[in-house]
C-alpha cells in the first residue's frame, strides 16, 4: 500500500479496527492533528449533529435512491435484513442469525423479536418478503434489482423466520441481501399504496424518524422511540444540509455551520487537514476509475495495444495528480487486496520502450489514435483521461479526450464507444464485479469481452464452496484479466471525510454507504446552540 | 470610421475602451503565438505552485503553466465572444429589419416569438440549446447567438419602424426603388448604429455566458484553455490555490470591461441627441 | 389608459408565456438522454430502463405530452417531478416564494444605490466622477456571476472573516429574522452587484438624454438652479424609462438567480432549474422554465401598466 501520509492512514485504520471490536473507544491521536482525548471516553447523549451532503435526495424511497444522500437517508430511516461490516462480511441487522443449506441454495433468516415500526407494529417475515418482492419487481425500477442475488422464491415460515431460495448456488446471499437499497419496509404500506407510498415519510423501523422537512435545503431527523436498540441514537436530533457547490460546503464546514462533511474531495481535504480542531478522516476503499476499452472496436480489439497502454502509465504519479495522493496504486485488477482471493500476477510499471515494441508488433509503429470519452461527473473522470493522454503520448498513442454531459455519456458512450472512463464504487463481493461487469451475460457487460473460459470459471467459482478451490479459481480468473486487460485501472481511490473534533464515533465504511450516525455523539466541547 | 474613432478618442470612456480593446486585439493576435511553455504539458514536479520566476502565474493541478494557458486561451475566449455576438447580431438585425419593414401579420408573428424567446433568460435558453444539440464550443457559440438574436431583432425593428417614416425612405419608395435596395441601402445602414452599440456590449456578455456554461459543464471542453473553462476548473482548488481563479479572472475582467467601455463610448458618440 | 389596452396587453402576455413554453418543450424534446437513464445511471439494464420509462410516462408522444401539460398547468396541475417523485407545483411554489424574497431584496438595494449613482454620473458626464462611477459599475459585469459569487463566498463567508453563512436558507418565520437576513445577505449582494452595473448605466444614459431635451433647456433658460433642474425635471422624466429598465432587468435577475442560488445553496427557482436540468427531469424543467418566463412576462406587463399610469401624455388606444 502506498500513501503520502502513513500517519493518517494508520490512525484511521487503528480507530476502525478498535471500533470493529465493538466498543465506542476513542483513541488518543498519534499524529498531532487529533487532540488528545481520554483513552476510554464515555459516549455523551444529547445535542444536534449537523452534517453536510452534496446531493439533493431524489425521493425518500430506499429502493429508488440514486445518490449518497439517498443512501444515507435510507440508512437512517430503515434497517436491512443484514448489514455489511468492515471486513465485507454479513452482520446481523433485522436478522439476528441465519443458516444456509449445504448447496448454498436455501437460506433461513431468524428475525429479531423486538423490531417495531414507528407505528408500533411488529416487523415480521411478511414485511421482509413484501420488501424483497417489491425490490425484485422491475416496475419498481430499483438500481439494485439485479444485485441482491439470484432469488427464486421465498417462504414465510412464521412471523420471525423466512427462507430465501436461489436459482443457483450463491454462497454470498447474506452479503448481497445487505445491499444499501435493500431495506425492509412495511408490507402494509406497500399493499395499500404500492412503492409510491415510500416516496414520502413512510412507516419505517430504523434508528431515526423524519422531523422537520425542508426538502430543498435541509432535513431534520429525530430519534425513533420504537427503534429496538434503546441506547441509540445518542444525539437528540440530526440535520442534513445540502450544499451543491463544493466551495460553499467546505466553507460552511470551516465556519462551523455543519459539524461533519460525510464526503469531501481531495483538494478540500488537503486544506482541511491543516485546520486546527478539524479531524480529517480517510478510509481506503476499492472504488476506482477504469479506462473501459471495448473488445469489439479498433484499435483496442488488439490485446497488444491494450498491453502497450498499460506500460505507459506511471501509476503513482496518477495517484498524486488525480487524487493528491489519496489512493492506492492498482494494476488493472478489478479486485483489490481488500478481498480474500486477491492475486496480482504482474505489476506493470512505466516502460515506454516496451510499450513501443508492443505497438510495433501490433502493426502501429507510426502510432495509434483513438478517443477517450468522459462525463462531467464525477470530476476525477476527466483527470484520469488527461493523465492517460499525456503519459501515453511518448509511446506513440495519439489520444483525443472528449467530455460529455452525464446523460449524453450514458446514452451515446457507455457500453458503445471504443474507450471511456467509467467510475465504479466498491462492491461487497468479488463475484459481484465479475457477474455484473465482465461475464458475457453480465447486465453491464461494458467491454464486450465475451470470453468463454472466463464465463466457465465464474460459473464454477459460484458452485464451489471449498475456500482453497475457490482461491485457485479466482487465481485463474485474475490471470485471465491480467492477460486480456479488459480495463485499465490505475488506482483505488480513498474515501475522504472530515469532522470537527467534538464529533465522535460515526463510521467510515469502505463501501461508503454506511455511516451509523445513530452511534455518533458530541463531546462536551461541542458548541452550544 | 476614422471619424468615429477620433471622436471616441476625445471621449474619456471611449478612449479607455479603445485602449482596452486594442490590448485585447494584441492578445488575440499574439497571445497564442508566444507562450513560454506548452500549455498542455504536465509538470509532475511543480504542481499547484504559486508565482515564481519560472511560472509568473503559477501552475495548476497537473503542473501546467498558467501563464501559457491564459495566453493561449485569449484567442479562444475573445474569438468566442466576438463570433457568437456577430452571428447573433447579424441574424437578429436581419430579422428585425425585415420584420419591421414589411410589418403586418408576419411582423406580428415574428415579434411574438421574439418576445417569447426574450422571456427565457439567455443563460437558461443557451443551456437548454447546448444540452439538446450537444456539448462543444461550436454549439455553445451557436446557442448564445440564438439567445441574443431576438432582443437584437427588437432593437433593429424599432429603429426600422422609425426610419421607415422618414422622408428619404418615403422618397425612395415614391421613386420606385426596389424593396431590396431600400432595405439594404436606406434602412440597414441607419439601423447599424444602435445595433453596433448593443453588440459591442454583448461581446463581454457572451464571454460571461460562455464561462458560465463552462462552470455548468456545458461550454468549452478540457483540455482546451478557454478562460471560462480555466476558472471553472480551478474553482475546485479555490481555497488552496486562489491564483488559478485570479489570473484568468483578471484576464476576463480586462476584456469585458474593455468592450463595455467601448460600447458605452460608442453609445455616446453615435447618439445624435447628445451630439452637440 | 383604457380597459381595452389593459386587456390586450394581458392577453399578449399570456400568449408570450405559452409561446415560451412551446419553445422550451420543443428544445427539451430533442435532449439526447432521458430522465430514465439519469435515474438509473450506470446501473441501468435495458429492462430496467423500459420499466422506468413506462413509470415516468416517457413513452408518450411529445405533442400529446405538451397538450396534457398545458391543460394541467392551466388548472394548476403541473404534473409530477420525475427525479423527486413529488408534484411539481409543491416543489415549485416553495421555490418561487424563496426566489421572490431574494429577488426583491436585491432589487431594493439596487434601486437605492444604482439610481443615485446613475444620476451623479450623468450630471458630471465626461468628468472623472463619471469615469469612477462607470468603472465601479463595470466591476459588476466584469466577471461571470459564478466568479463574483465565489469571491463573495471566499472573502465574506471564509473562516477568516466568517460574517455570513456560506450558504443555505433560513426562513423568516421558522429561524428568525436575523438568521434569515444573514442567509439572504450574500446571494442578494451578488445579484445586486451584477444588476447595479446595468441599472446605473441605463439611468445614466437616460438622464443624459433627458438633460439634453428641450424642456430641461427651457428650465435652465428660465433660471432654475442646477439642482432643481436635475432632480425636479430630469430625474422625474428619466425614472419613467427606469421603470421599464428595472422590469427588463427582472430577466437578468432571473438568469443570475440560476447561478447565484447554485453557488450559495439557496433553495429557490434557480437551483431547482439546475437540479431539473442535471437530472433531465422534463416535467420539472418545463414547468420551472414556464414559471421563469411568466415571471419575466408579468414584470413587463406590470411595467407597462405603471408606465401608462404614471405618464398620461402617452396615448394608448
Image: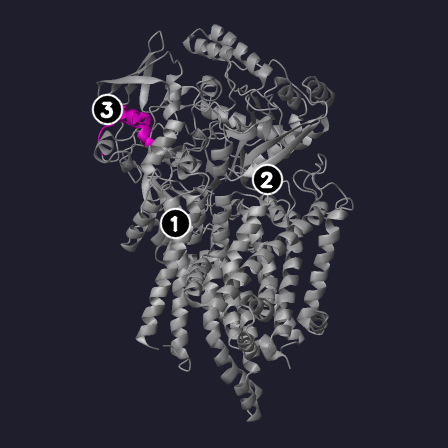
What is the CA distance from the residue labelled 1 to the residue labelled 2? Answer: 36 Å
Where residue A210 appears, x then y in whole percent? 32, 41
Determine if the magenta segment contains residue A133.
yes
Of marks 1 and 2, the one in the foreground: 1
Task: Say few, some or many: other residues with alpha carbon within 10 Å of mark 1 (under 14 / 14 to 19 / 20 or more).
Answer: many
In the depicted structure, whether residue B96 falls above or below residue A71: below
Is residue B60 shown above or below C44? below
Q: Is mark 1 on a helix, strand or loop?
A: helix
Residue on which disc 3 sits: A126
**Could you tell whether B76 is left or right of A177 in the image?**
right
Task: Please report the residue visible at 49 percent of the width from the left and 65 percent of the height from the top.
Answer: B154
Q: Nearer the viewer, mark 3 or mark 1?
A: 1
Q: Is A357 on the left-hand or right-hand side of A407?
A: right
- Per the rendered image, the range of residues in magenta is A120-141
Q: Which chain carries label 3?
A: A
**Given the image, what chain letter belongs to the residue carrying mark 1?**
C
- The secondary element bearing badge 3 is classed as helix
The quarter of the rendered structure image containing the N terminus of chain A is top right
How is the model colour-coded? one colour
Marks 3/2 same chain: yes
Provide the residue designation for mark 1. C286
Q: Nearer the viewer, residue C223 or A442?
A: A442
Q: Look at 48% across and 34% down and name the residue there.
A: A410
Q: Mark 2 lies on which chain?
A: A
Secondary structure mostly seen in magenta is: helix
Q: Which of disc 2 and disc 3 is earlier in sequence?
A: 3
Q: Where is residue C126 in the image (x, y as percent from the top left)?
A: 65, 76
The residue to which callout 2 is attached is: A267
Q: Is residue A323 visible?
A: no
Could you tell me residue C45's position as x and y percent?
A: 41, 27
Amino acid at each position: 500500500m502506498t500513501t503520502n501520509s502513513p500517519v493518517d492512514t494508520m490512525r484511521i485504520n487503528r480507530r476502525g479496527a478498535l471500533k470493529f471490536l465493538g466498543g465506542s473507544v476513542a483513541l488518543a491521536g498519534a499524529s498531532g492533528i487529533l487532540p488528545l482525548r481520554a483513552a476510554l471516553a464515555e459516549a455523551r447523549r444529547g445535542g444536534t449533529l449537523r452534517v453536510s451532503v452534496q446531493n439533493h435526495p431524489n425521493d425518500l424511497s430506499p429502493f429508488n435512491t440514486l445518490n449518497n444522500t439517498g443512501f444515507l437517508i435510507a440508512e437512517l430511516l430503515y434497517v436491512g435484513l443484514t448489514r455489511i461490516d468492515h471486513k465485507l462480511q454479513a452482520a446481523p441487522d433485522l436478522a439476528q442469525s441465519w443458516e444456509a443449506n449445504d448447496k448454498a441454495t436455501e437460506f433461513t433468516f431468524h428475525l429479531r423479536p423486538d423490531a417495531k415500526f414507528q407505528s408500533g407494529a411488529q416487523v415480521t417475515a411478511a414485511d421482509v418478503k413484501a420488501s424483497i418482492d417489491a425490490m425484485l419487481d422491475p416496475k419498481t425500477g430499483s438500481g439494485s434489482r439485479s444485485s441482491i442475488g439470484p432469488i427464486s422464491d421465498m417462504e414465510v415460515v412464521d412471523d420471525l423466520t423466512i427462507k430465501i431460495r436461489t436459482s443457483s448456488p450463491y454462497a454470498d446471499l447474506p452479503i448481497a441481501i445487505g445491499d444499501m437499497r435493500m431495506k425492509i419496509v412495511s408490507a402494509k404500506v406497500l399493499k395499500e399504496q404500492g412503492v409510491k407510498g415510500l416516496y414520502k415519510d413512510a412507516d419505517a423501523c430504523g434508528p431515526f424518524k423524519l422531523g422537520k422537512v425542508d426538502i430543498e435545503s435541509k432535513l431534520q431527523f429525530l430519534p425513533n422511540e420504537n427503534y429496538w436498540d434503546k441506547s441509540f441514537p445518542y444525539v437528540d436530533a440530526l440535520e442534513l444540509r445540502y450544499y451543491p457547490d463544493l466551495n460553499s460546503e467546505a466553507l460552511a464546514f470551516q465556519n462551523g455551520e455543519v459539524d461533519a462533511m460525510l464526503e469531501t474531495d481531495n483538494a478540500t481535504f488537503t486544506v482541511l487537514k491543516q485546520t486546527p480542531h478539524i479531524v480529517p478522516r480517510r478510509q481506503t476503499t476499492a472504488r476506482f476509475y477504469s479506462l473501459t476499452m471495448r473488445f469489439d472496436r479498433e484499435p483496442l480489439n488488439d490485446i497488444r495495444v491494450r498491453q502497450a497502454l498499460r506500460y505507459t502509465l506511471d501509476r503513482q504519479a496518477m495517484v498524486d495528480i488525480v487524487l493528491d495522493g489519496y489512493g492506492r496504486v492498482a494494476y488493472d485488477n478489478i479486485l483489490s487486496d481488500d478481498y480474500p482471493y486477491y492475486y496480482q500476477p504482474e505489476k506493470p510499471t512505466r516502460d515506454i520502450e516496451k510499450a513501443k515494441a508492443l505497438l510495433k508488433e501490433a502493426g502501429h509503429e507510426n502510432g495509434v489514435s483513438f478517443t477517450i470519452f468522459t462525463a462531467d461527473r464525477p470530476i476525477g473522470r476527466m483527470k484520469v483521461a488527461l493523465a492517460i493522454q499525456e503519459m501515453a503520448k511518448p509511446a506513440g498513442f495519439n489520444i483525443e479526450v472528449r467530455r460529455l454531459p452525464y446523460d449524453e455519456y450514458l446514452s451515446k458512450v457507455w457500453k458503445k464507444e471504443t474507450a471511456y472512463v467509467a467510475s465504479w464504487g466498491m462492491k461487497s463481493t468479488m463475484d459481484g464485479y465479475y457477474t455484473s461487469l465482465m461475464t458475457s451475460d453480465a447486465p453491464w457487460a461494458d467491454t464486450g469481452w465475451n470470453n468463454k473460459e472466463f464465463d466457465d470459471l465464474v460459473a464454477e467459482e459460484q458452485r464451489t464452496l471449498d475456500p482453497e478451490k475457490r482461491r485457485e479459481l479466482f487465481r485463474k480468473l485474475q490471470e485471465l484479466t491480467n492477460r486480456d486487460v479488459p480495463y485499465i485501472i490505475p488506482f483505488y481511490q480513498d474515501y475522504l471525510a472530515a469532522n470537527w473534533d467534538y464529533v465522535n464515533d460515526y463510521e467510515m465504511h469502505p463501501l461508503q454507504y454506511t455511516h451509523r450516525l445513530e452511534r455518533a455523539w458530541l463531546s462536551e466541547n461541542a458548541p452550544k446552540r | 470610421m476614422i471619424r468615429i474613432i477620433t471622436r471616441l478618442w476625445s471621449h474619456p470612456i471611449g478612449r479607455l475602451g479603445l485602449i482596452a480593446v486594442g490590448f485585447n486585439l494584441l492578445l488575440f493576435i499574439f497571445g497564442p503565438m508566444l507562450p513560454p511553455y506548452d500549455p498542455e504539458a504536465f509538470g509532475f514536479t511543480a504542481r499547484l505552485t504559486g508565482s515564481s520566476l519560472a511560472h509568473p502565474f503559477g501552475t495548476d493541478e497537473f503542473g501546467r503553466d498558467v501563464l501559457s494557458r491564459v495566453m493561449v486561451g485569449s484567442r479562444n475566449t475573445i474569438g468566442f465572444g466576438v463570433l457568437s455576438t456577430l452571428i447573433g447580431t447579424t441574424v437578429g438585425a436581419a430579422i428585425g429589419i425585415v420584420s419591421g419593414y414589411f410589418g403586418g401579420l408576419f411582423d406580428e408573428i415574428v415579434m411574438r416569438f421574439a418576445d417569447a424567446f426574450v422571456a427565457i433568460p439567455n443563460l437558461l435558453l443557451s443551456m437548454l440549446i447546448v444540452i439538446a444539440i450537444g456539448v462543444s464550443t461550436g454549439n455553445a457559440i451557436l446557442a448564445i447567438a440564438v439567445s441574443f438574436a431576438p432582443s437584437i431583432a427588437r432593437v433593429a425593428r424599432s429603429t426600422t419602424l422609425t426610419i421607415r417614416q422618414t422622408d428619404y425612405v418615403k422618397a425612395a419608395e415614391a421613386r420606385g426603388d426596389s424593396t431590396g435596395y431600400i432595405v439594404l441601402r436606406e434602412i440597414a445602414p441607419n439601423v447599424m448604429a444602435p445595433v453596433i452599440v448593443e453588440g459591442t456590449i454583448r461581446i463581454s456578455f457572451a464571454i460571461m455566458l460562455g464561462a458560465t456554461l463552462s462552470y455548468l459543464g456545458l461550454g468549452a471542453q478540457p483540455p482546451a484553455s478557454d478562460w471560462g473553462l480555466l476558472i471553472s476548473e480551478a474553482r475546485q482548488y479555490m481555497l488552496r490555490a486562489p491564483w488559478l481563479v485570479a489570473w484568468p479572472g483578471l484576464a476576463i475582467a480586462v476584456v469585458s470591461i474593455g468592450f463595455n467601455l467601448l460600447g458605452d463610448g460608442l453609445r455616446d458618440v453615435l447618439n445624435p441627441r447628445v451630439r452637440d | 389608459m383604457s380597459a381595452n389596452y389593459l386587456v390586450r396587453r394581458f392577453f399578449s402576455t399570456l400568449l408570450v408565456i405559452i409561446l415560451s413554453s412551446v419553445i422550451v418543450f420543443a428544445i427539451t424534446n430533442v435532449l439526447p438522454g432521458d430522465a430514465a437513464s439519469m435515474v438509473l445511471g450506470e446501473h441501468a439494464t435495458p429492462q430496467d430502463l423500459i420499466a422506468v420509462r413506462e413509470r415516468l410516462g416517457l413513452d408518450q408522444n411529445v405533442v400529446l405530452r405538451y397538450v396534457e401539460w398545458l391543460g394541467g398547468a392551466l388548472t394548476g396541475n403541473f404534473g409530477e417531478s420525475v427525479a423527486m417523485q413529488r408534484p411539481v407545483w409543491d416543489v415549485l411554489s416553495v421555490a418561487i416564494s424563496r426566489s421572490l424574497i431574494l429577488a426583491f431584496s436585491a432589487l431594493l438595494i439596487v434601486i437605492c444605490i444604482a439610481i443615485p449613482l446613475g444620476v451623479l454620473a450623468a450630471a458630471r458626464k465626461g468628468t472623472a466622477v463619471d469615469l469612477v462611477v462607470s468603472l465601479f459599475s463595470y466591476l459588476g459585469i466584469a466577471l461571470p456571476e459564478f466568479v463574483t459569487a465565489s469571491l463573495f463566498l471566499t472573502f465574506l463567508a471564509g473562516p477568516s472573516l466568517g460574517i455570513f453563512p456560506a450558504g443555505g436558507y433560513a426562513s423568516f418565520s421558522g429561524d428568525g429574522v436575523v438568521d434569515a437576513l444573514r442567509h439572504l445577505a450574500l446571494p442578494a449582494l451578488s445579484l445586486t452587484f451584477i444588476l447595479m452595473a446595468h441599472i446605473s448605466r441605463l439611468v445614466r444614459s437616460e438622464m443624459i438624454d433627458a438633460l439634453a431635451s428641450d424642456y430641461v433647456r427651457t428650465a435652465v433658460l428660465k433660471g432654475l438652479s442646477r439642482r432643481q433642474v436635475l432632480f425636479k425635471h430630469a430625474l422625474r422624466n428619466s425614472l419613467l424609462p427606469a421603470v421599464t429598465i428595472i422590469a427588463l432587468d427582472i430577466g437578468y435577475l432571473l438568469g443570475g438567480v440560476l447561478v447565484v442560488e447554485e453557488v450559495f445553496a439557496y433553495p429557490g427557482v434557480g437551483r431547482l432549474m439546475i437540479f431539473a436540468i442535471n437530472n433531465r427531469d422534463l416535467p420539472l424543467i418545463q414547468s420551472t422554465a414556464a414559471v421563469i418566463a411568466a415571471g419575466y412576462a408579468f414584470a413587463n406587463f406590470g411595467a407597462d401598466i405603471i408606465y401608462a399610469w404614471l405618464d398620461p401624455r402617452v396615448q394608448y388606444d
